[in-house]
Image (tube, grey):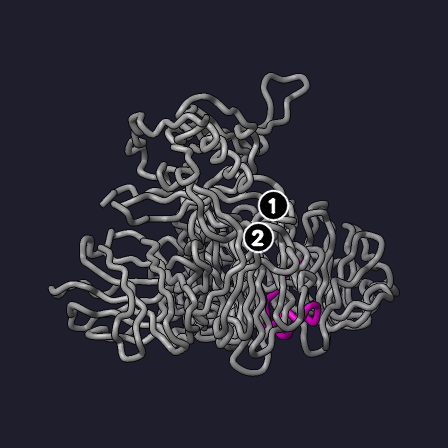
Amino acid sequence: MIRSYGNLPSLPDAGLLLRYLDTFGVIVPIARTNLVTNPSVETNATGYTAVGSVASVDRAAGAPSYHGAYGLVASLSNPGPTDGFYYGPIALTSGQLYAVSCKFKSSSIGLKYKLSVATTAGVDLVSYRFRAAGVWQWIWLYYKETSTTNRRIYLLKDDATTDAISAFYADGFQCEPINAGEFVSTFIDGDQQGLVPNQYPPAYGWTGTPHASTSYRIGQTRAGGYVVKFRDLGFLLTTIIGLGMAPPDHQALTFAQLDGGQYENTIKPPRQFSLAGRWGGYTPTELDAGQAALGSLLDRDLVGQRQPLVLTTQAMDCNTPIGDIAQIQALYQQGLEGNIQELPSAAGSITFTQYLPMVLGHDQGVALDVQDSITSYGGILYKPPGGTWAKLGVGTNGSVNAIVVAPSGLVYVGGSFTDAGGSGADYLAVWNPQTATWAVVKSATSIGNTVNALALAPNGNLYVGGSFTNADGIAAADYIVMYNPTANTFSALGTGMNDVVNALAVAPDGTLYATGNFTTAGGGAAARVAKWNGSAWSALGTGFASPGQALVVASNGTLYAGGDFVNGGGVAAADYIAAWNGTAWVGLSTGMDNSVNALAIGLDGTLYAGGIFTTAGGVTAGGIAAFNGVQWKQLGSGFASPGTDTPNAMAVQANGTLLIASNGAVIDPGTPGAFFQWNGSAYTTLGITASATGDAVTIAPDGTIYIGVSGTIVAGGITTATNGGTAYAYPRLIINGPSSGTSRIYELDSLTIGASIYLNLTMSAGETAVLTLDPKNVTFVSSFQGNIISKILPGSQTTSFLLQKGNNTILFFAASSTVTAALQWPVGYLNLSDAIPRTMP
């Protein structure tokens, strides 16, 4: 005979430990369909209609949202007792049972609301009434349809009193057909993903047009389903062990002959946690049946494809779940092996392995600004490390041809302008970043004509070259002059030149080199190139027969010159480019087939050259090439039309990236406008385009980039993405194509952590692309082009792009302002308790 324990006292309930033990459960996979065709308002608010005194119901980026970047906002004009909105019509079938649910949030704690299914005339058929808790609430009801007809889903205030709040919020509307004895399930949206990389068929999907059709979840994903509480299977949870902050693994390289080691990284390895409690039942068989039932839900074989299971819990306010739905991805380890006892209860502990050592919450998101125009910038812009492009006051009223940054931080600029920031400075001016002001250099008229080149001496003196004569009234200061910032004086360099100076460079030993159109320097013959040793000018061999345009000095003192000349220094192979080794000119392979306008030296000594040439050393070059000391090679595909699209200036960043200012666009991979960079493998934007000319580029010691530019400026849009969790998050980027035609998509940057994703992607109207930046599963899929992972350019940091806790400054850049984009990410918590509202209602 089976013994009964029904006459024994009942087991005591669990305490109030964090108020979530009673809701701890596991998601059971089940295939479902969401009949709400626009459940998370990611693209529009179609289907939602305001009721009562609600002035509008609309999607809003940045407003509270539970699923994705947007949520519904009910804005109240003259608050009344039954304000809200409805979704519909929605076609229901006679005799079918439905679960209707949504996420809700209102700051008016205690105010009554109701979720209801109603006729198209607004007559309630079934309602669920609840009170606002001040945090997100998961609200649901069940309804069995009595006829085949259209219905509405209402979310309204349910109070006889008015209320002064300005808005309340909702997200994740769902109406799912279910069978008798089944429960409401987690949210379904065709944009969601499963737990398995590249799962096929997909875990979630749309039955038609995204965000305008029903959506589904298959029964072979543990990412969603209905929740079965442990308590309902007889397991009363009393203790959670190991779901606090994960213990880190600090990685270091031990020194061989020194104490200690070098810290390298910290990772959070997989961990185990346990759920301890009591099993209860009226008979041993019932107790064992509860263990067996839970075991089947946690077992690997519940679904065909290997994947983690998802445990969930949520705080409770009376009988209503409130706050975030905490999700723990884990795998069952042990504790349900079976232990039938002749007792009404038995202590137990179930152990799991958690491979992602954090607790996940809802999907947060933000709509991205896709581009911003920069107006009235006055010929010059700057971008600090980790910052965005900005103006230097009102800039100048003409072109900026040269920029240098002094050790003091002062920024000297030269060009064809006759005013800088209202200072009245002609052709030469100085910007003080500390005071954000422009000033003249000694006097407004010290330089009487265009400045082409600037260079700094080791002692901080400034060399100025250009088209001017008699600088600062000094008769000998023709085409070149030196400014001493300490004494605030100009002085001539010998008797100057007899014609225009186009470029200057200072060697490590302080020697000044100049090139241009001149044929004499200091009164002596110097065919378009010369050097100044601090007291006198001297020629460099026989010089050049045509003007020089660019100079750069390598760390070993070698001088490289580029220009319009052939047979430089009388050397047959020195066409348009040549090297001065201290005693003679030498060719660099066979030189170029046309002019060189810009030069730069890489961190490894590589020489970069830009100009209107089409070959370098006999190799196809397309206007830009690199010389490794032996041979030339083209950088990517180069310029489409080197004679038209020409580099004007180049500089190398501390990370080795080559910055290029030009008056055209590189065709590899179609990087737009005047400014771009070469990262060793590909051309990418600098987060800015210009429809006209890039005249100058320089990099300050602190990494700040300064550019001289003219034309229309469009920069990447800047958005603050606030990660509301306590752990970092890996986001998804959702891009919707332009309203018409096509648009290039250039890049996604986190300026906060210094990570960038560069794209060679052109999207069409109606196309959607989703870039998933989970390091375990980086994917890039287009609704039109399919797998587009190849559109991610080399040098992109796909596996390290993340959102830190709190505010993250994000740059996104598209060619068309009609492109829309959003970031979405799962909120992560370091501790299970972080997911529970800090202030309980």
Q: According to the image, label 1 marks what residue?
A: 307
Check the image and name the residue furthest to the front. 1
Count of labels in the image = 2
Q: Tag 2: residue type?
A: Thr
**Residue that appears at 39% across and 64% down:** 173
Q: Main secondary structure of the magenta part?
A: loop
User: Toward the viewer: 339 or 19?
Assistant: 339
Question: For the magenta stretch, what is the residue range?
Answer: 663-678
* In this view, 15 is above or below 840: above
What x and y, as percent, mark residue 721? 42, 56
**Residue that appears at 25% across and 52% down:** 134
Q: Is residue 382 visible?
A: no
Q: Quadrant of residue 618?
A: bottom right
What x and y, as percent, mark residue 813? 53, 67
Q: Tag 1: residue type?
A: Gln
Residue 221: mark in rendering: 2
User: Toward the viewer: 220 or 245?
Assistant: 220
